[in-house]
Image (tube, rainbow, N blue to C red):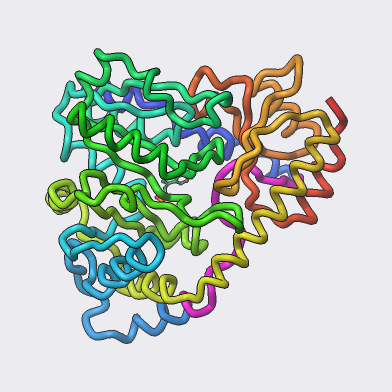
């Protein structure tokens, strides 16, 4: 009676981890959750103030314009111009109820059921689960540490490139923290254009980078706007629960996405959209100061892991650290040991792809002193 699409859908990895966490909390244990990438930092006061103030706006309670309010779209256009030197038109921007929503709804714009796409692994799990729901086949191309977790185009077979209609990249990359450079993006754009594959970068972490690096958008290297990119307020502005993001770039894709969305949702609550405008108006020092916090946490964890003989990928992006499991452990046995012995939640590498069971991910979304105290108490491996 029920569909195999849902029956075959893997449980979102954090749900399983969350269950164990809840059981421990119920027993009164203190848990250090370095699992999910949900920032512990607070949204800036001006974001909260704008949210509250907007409740007094006329028609704040009505259905919002489907594509998002014009003021927010203009602010995103201004942001792309200022930060990435990319010029966008209004019809090249659509507001999303978080980028996860947009990722799923973009797929049927490009693919019919039975079509194929390319995703890289390790990956943010919803790329594959959403594709499965739409009846789309994922061709998974592995990323290797020896290539700094950048996609090697030689690893894509002719058959896969011939059959695929879309490629999803994600740089700065979750879970590895890898960042892409101009040369890389230009090569992939050239490849996709020559193979008639639409190209997307999930830019959720575009601004979550080592304080000395400059944020990069794939659109900076794509004058024709062949590509499109997802963005979100979740990570940069500590607004995960607000559920607000955007897609920009390729006009045909953006307009198609809007059409699909019209069948699913009616846009995000208007005051949240105004709060997002307040976020984009914050001085750059605000973002820099958050990045300094993440960098200092990352450095602290690196130092501890060095002492404990745990190897990690020395990345410049995201608030994650992608680490090797110690000798004699796989991701699951190590995650269990961390939870049982130290009450620390980490994410097993295989949550991001089955071949990555010799890795685990640490999310630096907890305060530095607690991280240092708890991880410092670990034994050496
Ligand atoms: C790579 C990546 N893309 C998208 C998202 C979803 O972000 P949002 O809160 O905008 O749905 C996440 C969240 O963890 C992510 O890691």
Q: Is residue 245 above or below residue 359?
A: below
Is 41 part of what is drawn in magenta?
A: yes
Q: Is residue 145 above or below residue 159?
A: below
Q: Nearer the viewer, residue 172 or 66?
A: 172
Tell me where residue 111 sits by quadrant. top left
The location of residue 266, given as percent across then percent down, is 20, 59
Please name the residue shown 33% across and 66% down the image: 81
Please, what is the dominant secondary structure of the magenta stretch? loop
Is residue 22 in view from this perspective?
no
Please name the residue shown 78% across and 53% down the image: 370
Image quadrant where one finds the N terminus: top left
The location of residue 149, given as percent across then percent down, is 52, 30
The location of residue 144, given as percent across then percent down, is 53, 23
- Residues rendered magenta in the picture: 29-48
Is residue 208 in view from this perspective?
yes
Q: Nearer the viewer, residue 152 or 47?
A: 152
Tell me where residue 276 sits by quadrant. bottom left
Please name the residue shown 29% across and 37% down the image: 189
Q: Is residue 215 left or right of residue 197?
A: right
């Amino acid at each position: 009676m029920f569909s195999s699409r849902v029956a075959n859908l893997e449980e979102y990895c954090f749900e399983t981890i969350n269950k164990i966490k809840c059981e421990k909390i119920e027993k009164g244990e203190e848990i250090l959750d370095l699992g999910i990438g949900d920032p512990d930092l607070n949204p800036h006061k001006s974001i909260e103030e704008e949210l509250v103030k907007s409740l007094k706006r006329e028609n704040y309670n009505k259905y919002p314009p489907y594509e998002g309010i014009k003021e927010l779209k203009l602010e995103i256009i201004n942001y792309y111009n200022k930060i990435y030197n990319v010029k966008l038109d209004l019809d090249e921007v659509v507001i999303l109820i978080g980028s996860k929503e947009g990722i799923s709804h973009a797929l049927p714009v490009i693919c019919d059921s039975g079509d194929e796409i390319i995703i890289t692994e390790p990956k943010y799990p919803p790329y594959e689960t959403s594709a499965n729901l739409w009846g789309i086949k994922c061709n998974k191309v592995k990323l290797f540490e020896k290539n700094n977790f950048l996609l090697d185009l030689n690893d894509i077979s002719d058959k896969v490139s011939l059959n695929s209609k879309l490629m999803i990249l994600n740089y700065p990359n979750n879970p590895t923290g890898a960042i892409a450079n101009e040369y890389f993006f230009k090569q992939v754009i050239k490849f996709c254009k020559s193979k008639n594959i639409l190209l997307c970068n999930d830019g959720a972490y575009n601004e979550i980078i080592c304080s000395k690096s400059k944020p990069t958008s794939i659109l900076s290297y794509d004058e024709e706007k062949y590509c499109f990119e997802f963005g979100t307020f979740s990570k940069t502005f500590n607004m995960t629960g607000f559920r607000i993001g955007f897609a920009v770039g390729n006009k045909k894709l953006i307009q198609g996405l809007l059409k699909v969305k019209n069948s699913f949702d009616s846009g995000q609550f208007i005051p949240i959209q105004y709060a997002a405008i307040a976020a984009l108006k914050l001085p750059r020092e605000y973002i820099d100061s958050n990045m300094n916090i993440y960098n200092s946490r990352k450095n602290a964890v690196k130092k501890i892991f060095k002492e404990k003989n745990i190897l990690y990928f020395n990345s410049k992006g995201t608030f994650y650290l992608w680490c090797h499991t110690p000798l004699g452990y796989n991701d699951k046995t190590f995650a269990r040991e961390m939870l049982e012995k130290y009450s620390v939640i980490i994410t097993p590498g295989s949550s991001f792809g089955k071949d990555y069971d010799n890795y685990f991910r640490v999310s630096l979304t907890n305060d530095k002193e607690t991280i240092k105290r708890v991880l410092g108490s670990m034994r050496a491996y």
